[in-house]
Image (spheres, rainbow, N blue to C red):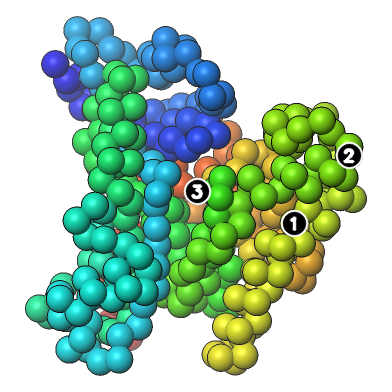
């Protein structure tokens, strides 16, 4: 039995934490009534997670509470591709062959969505005139695992979204709202890889993955500090007991070089200059990573003014809900609430009226 949708519940679930918001409903205008975070551990108690959600919403008389969820499937991917011609971009057979040969992605094993890289909209092969595409998705078994996990918590995902894409949409909309016209370098660290994106005025110009993730940092940290094993280094890395400001550039040297290569090539190719850096997902105690990278690349950290942005999306905050010090990693959760196309429609209407 499902709990009637008298309240809205939005959830962003990563390997690090659960970010959640109870709202007045799912339709705009809406009010954010409460925010909550639950840090996750490898051996997390399911009952503790259920109690976390029950502290936010009323489960009485139902088995599940309806929600809209953002997830980060283990094998997720986002790839940019520009076809030689529009006709090739409309050829399903060609695109399937290209996905296998160029990106190693098989349609048989993966859930794949194709987006128009110019604005993030769903790509319509019959009507579209664009040859700039974004392929995004994850292995079906990884999506299924995330869905099963959410159901185990007593949450029914009315919508299950790929948070990587949702967040990029939110960052693009925030840039539009805040009149940031220069490109933005976005990156997302996973255990084994780093996903690198460059956004420019609502367009995804770069989406690539490099084989360097958090797991690559622990051996470096172990050697630097003389720790007994990588597991000890990992525990220290995520603790709040060590200041990584001085050691950060050395630990992140390989990542910084990859980001520098991507941004440098892009700037030479386009003649544009990247202004901001944005790091998603990672918990607050790893904010030094964003600062280290931004300082190394001489970029400004994108630190969104969340309340003003939400108000522009017709989303208000209840008294007592404070967002000033939340940090940019909450953009994924709030991006689940936004209907960004409404802003574009208003802008187009304003242009036509001039």
Q: CA distance from mark 2 to mark 1?
A: 15 Å
Picture disc at residue 225: 2
- Calculate the distance from the C-alpha at mark 2 to the C-alpha at mark 3: 34 Å
Query: Which residue has dot 3 on it?
Result: 331
Q: Nearer the viewer, mark 3 or mark 1?
A: 1
* Image quadrant in which you'd find residue 333: top left
Give the vertical position of 29 relative to 241 (above or below).
below
**72 and 32: which is toward the camera:** 72
SS state under label 1: loop
- On the image, the x and y values in percent for residue 125 come to 14, 76
Write the residue at 22% across / 60% down.
107
* Label 1, residues with CA under 10 Å away: few <14, some 14-19, many ≥20: many
| N-term mark: 3 or 1 | 1
Which tag, 2 or 3, sits closer to the chain's start?
2
Place of residue 116 in the rendered image (x, y in percent of width and height, measured from the top left) = 29, 73
In the drawing, does residue 186 fall left or right of residue 45? right
Quadrant hosting residue 98: bottom left
For disc 1, the marked residue is 252
């Amino acid at each position: 039995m499902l709990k009637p949708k008298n309240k809205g519940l939005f959830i962003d679930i990563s390997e690090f934490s659960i970010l959640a918001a109870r709202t007045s409903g799912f339709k705009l205008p809406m009010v954010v009534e409460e925010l909550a975070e639950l840090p996750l551990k490898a051996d997390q108690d399911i009952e503790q997670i259920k109690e976390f959600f029950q502290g936010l919403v009323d489960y009485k008389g139902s088995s599940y509470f309806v929600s809209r969820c953002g997830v980060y499937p283990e094998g997720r991917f986002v790839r940019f591709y520009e076809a030689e011609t529009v006709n090739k971009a409309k050829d399903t057979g060609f695109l399937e062959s290209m996905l296998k040969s160029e990106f190693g992605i098989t349609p048989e094993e993966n859930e794949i969505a194709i987006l128009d890289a110019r604005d993030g909209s769903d790509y319509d092969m019959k009507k579209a005139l664009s040859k700039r595409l974004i392929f995004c998705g994850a292995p079906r078994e990884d999506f299924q695992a995330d869905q099963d996990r959410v159901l185990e918590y007593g949450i029914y995902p009315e919508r299950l979204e790929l948070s990587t894409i949702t967040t990029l949409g939110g960052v693009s909309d925030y840039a539009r709202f805040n009149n940031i016209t220069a490109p933005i370098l976005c990156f997302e660290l996973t255990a084994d890889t780093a996903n690198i994106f460059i956004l420019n005025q609502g367009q995804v110009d770069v989406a690539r993955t490099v084989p360097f993730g958090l797991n690559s940092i622990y051996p470096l940290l172990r050697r630097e500090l003389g720790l007994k094993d990588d597991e000890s280094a990992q525990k220290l890395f995520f603790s709040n007991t060590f200041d990584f400001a001085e050691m950060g550039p050395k630990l992140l040297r390989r990542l910084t070089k990859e980001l520098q290569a991507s941004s440098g090539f892009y700037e030479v190719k386009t003649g544009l200059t990247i202004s901001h850096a944005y790091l998603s997902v990672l918990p607050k105690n790893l904010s030094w990573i964003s600062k280290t990278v931004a300082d190394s690349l001489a970029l400004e950290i994108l630190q969104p003014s969340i309340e003003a942005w939400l108000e522009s999306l017709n989303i208000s905050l209840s008294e007592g809900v404070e967002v000033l010090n939340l940090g940019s990693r909450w953009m994924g959760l709030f991006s689940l609430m936004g209907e960004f196309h409404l802003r574009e429609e208003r802008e187009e209407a304003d242009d036509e009226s001039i």
